[in-house]
Image (tube, rainbow, N blue to C red):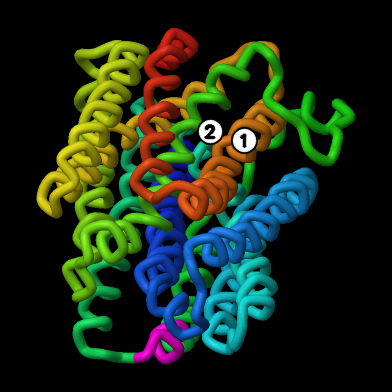
């Protein structure tokens, strides 16, 4: 029995890695083509920010929907459903013909991505809790790997001058294969009777005892979302770099995330989580500040890479620590912190877009310096889990 349980856990480990990778790859496929979509539809920064807000609205609706479905269906089922919606939304983006259509279709794409994000993190946290060692960093590292591979593929496709419509449709048609495989490898959720017995509102902030973890996740996600949606546009509009190298900033960010997340398990053997969070926050804040102040291509690319390195440990440590509270049901803790954290990813970029329209994108990105500094101040909320 113990052997079969371990095999199931090992299969679910691969499922969590795969789900993170595919989810990020689909998002990166959209991200690297944002400037091309904007040019095709004649949109300025403010319009792009507002359109991205459609993605945020769709994701926010998915938070409540996915959280409710997770009360009576396994996270693997929820991940499959929302993964297919996410892929369909990407294909539909190829049909956008004006601002209004882009806004609506981004809501569909965001709905699929948001629900998939909640479900796959719920599964990953379950798997992480089943092992004796810390694996959330690796799972989130696979998300970074998916973003990096997606950015590299996007750069190659841009270099080949392949239309974004073709890229979106072909990628979406291939996506169901890994999603079905992930479903077959994933494991059933461990039910917490306290979650079933506790009435829950449609949307809820994390309880006070873990609110600090939610704020860390929120601030980190604002930075991640900013790098994802605005890094290439920053190179094109602020630095006047319009060829495929305009994607290097996001690639550097993804590489930093990748290195930090895959090495976090080893680092945490020697450094307390709160110390790592505080130090990593300083790396992100200082790196981005210097990059934006110097404002040369190489300094910005390095700065974006340091943001990725610094933020890489925040979400894994916060999500992993969520399961350690003795009084809060795991299901409620997971759903509330993941929802608050992901809200920063989807609501941060459009807000930055509106600020950029009134001031400049360079000034707007300095707000990310503020959120990373806030993480430094919130670091004591992180408690050692194991």
Tell me whether circle 1 and circle 2 mark residues in contact (CB < 8 Å).
Answer: yes
Q: Which residue is mark 1?
A: 340
Q: Is residue 132 above or below residue 342?
A: above
Residue found 32% across the figure and 41% down from its top: 138
Dot placed on the residue nearer the N-terminal end, 1 or 2: 2
Task: Based on the picture, tell me whether residue 164 belongs to the magenta stretch.
Answer: yes
Q: Is residue 204 above or below residue 272?
A: below
Residue found 38% across the figure and 16% down from its top: 376
Image side of residue 255 versus residue 323, left or right:
left
Count the marks: how many? 2
Q: Quadrant of the C terminus?
A: top left
Expressed as whole percent of the image width and height from the top left, the position of residue 228 reads 39, 55
Task: Based on the picture, tell me whether residue 374 belongs to the magenta stretch.
Answer: no
Q: Quadrant of residue 196?
A: top right
Q: CA distance from mark 1 to mark 2?
A: 6 Å
Q: Nearer the viewer, residue 199 or 280?
A: 280
Tag 2: Cα neighbours inside 10 Å, few (<14), some, or many (≥20)?
Answer: many
Q: Please, what secondary structure does the residue beneath circle 1 have?
A: helix
Expressed as whole percent of the image width and height from the top left, the position of residue 237 reads 31, 63
Tag 1: Cα neighbours inside 10 Å, few (<14), some, or many (≥20)?
Answer: many
Instruction: Point out the stretch of residues depicted in magenta.
Output: 163-168
Can you name the residue that lies furthest to the front here? 358
Q: Which mark is residue 230?
A: none
Q: Which residue is mark 2?
A: 218
Residue found 10% across the figure and 50% down from its top: 298
């Amino acid at each position: 029995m113990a052997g079969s349980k371990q095999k199931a856990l090992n299969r679910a480990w691969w499922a969590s890695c795969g789900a993170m990778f595919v989810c990020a790859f689909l998002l990166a496929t959209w991200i690297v083509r944002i400037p091309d979509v904007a040019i095709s539809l004649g949109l300025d920064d403010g319009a792009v920010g507002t359109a991205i807000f459609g993605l945020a609205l769709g994701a926010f609706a998915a938070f409540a929907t996915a959280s409710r479905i997770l009360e009576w269906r396994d996270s693997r089922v929820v991940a499959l459903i929302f993964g297919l919606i996410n892929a369909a939304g990407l294909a539909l983006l190829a049909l956008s013909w004006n601002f209004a259509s882009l806004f609506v279709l981004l809501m569909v794409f965001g709905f699929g991505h948001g629900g998939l994000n909640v479900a796959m993190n719920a599964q990953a946290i379950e798997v992480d809790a089943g092992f004796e060692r810390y694996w959330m960093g690796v799972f989130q590292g696979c998300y970074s790997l998916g973003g990096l591979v997606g950015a590299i593929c996007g750069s190659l496709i841009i270099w080949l001058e392949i239309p974004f419509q073709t890229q979106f449709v072909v990628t979406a048609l291939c996506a169901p294969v890994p999603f079905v495989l992930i479903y077959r490898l994933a494991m059933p959720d461990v039910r917490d009777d306290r979650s079933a017995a506790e009435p829950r509102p449609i949307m809820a902030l994390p309880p006070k005892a873990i609110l600090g973890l939610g704020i860390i996740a929120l601030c980190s996600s604002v930075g991640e979302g900013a790098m994802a949606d605005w890094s290439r546009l920053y190179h094109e509009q602020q630095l006047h770099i319009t060829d495929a190298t305009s994607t290097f900033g996001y690639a550097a960010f993804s590489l930093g995330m990748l290195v930090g997340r895959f090495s976090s398990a080893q680092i945490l053997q020697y450094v307390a989580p709160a110390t790592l969070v505080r130090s990593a926050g300083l790396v992100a804040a200082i790196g981005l500040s210097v990059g934006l102040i110097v404002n040369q291509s190489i300094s910005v690319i390095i700065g974006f890479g340091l943001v990725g390195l610094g933020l890489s440990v925040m979400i894994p440590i916060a999500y992993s620590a969520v399961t350690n509270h003795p009084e809060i049901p795991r299901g409620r803790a997971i759903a509330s912190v993941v929802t608050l954290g992901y809200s920063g990813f989807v609501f941060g970029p459009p807000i930055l877009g509106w600020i950029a329209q009134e001031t400049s994108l360079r000034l707007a990105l300095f707000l990310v310096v503020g959120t990373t500094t806030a993480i430094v101040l919130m670091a004591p909320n992180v408690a050692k889990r194991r």
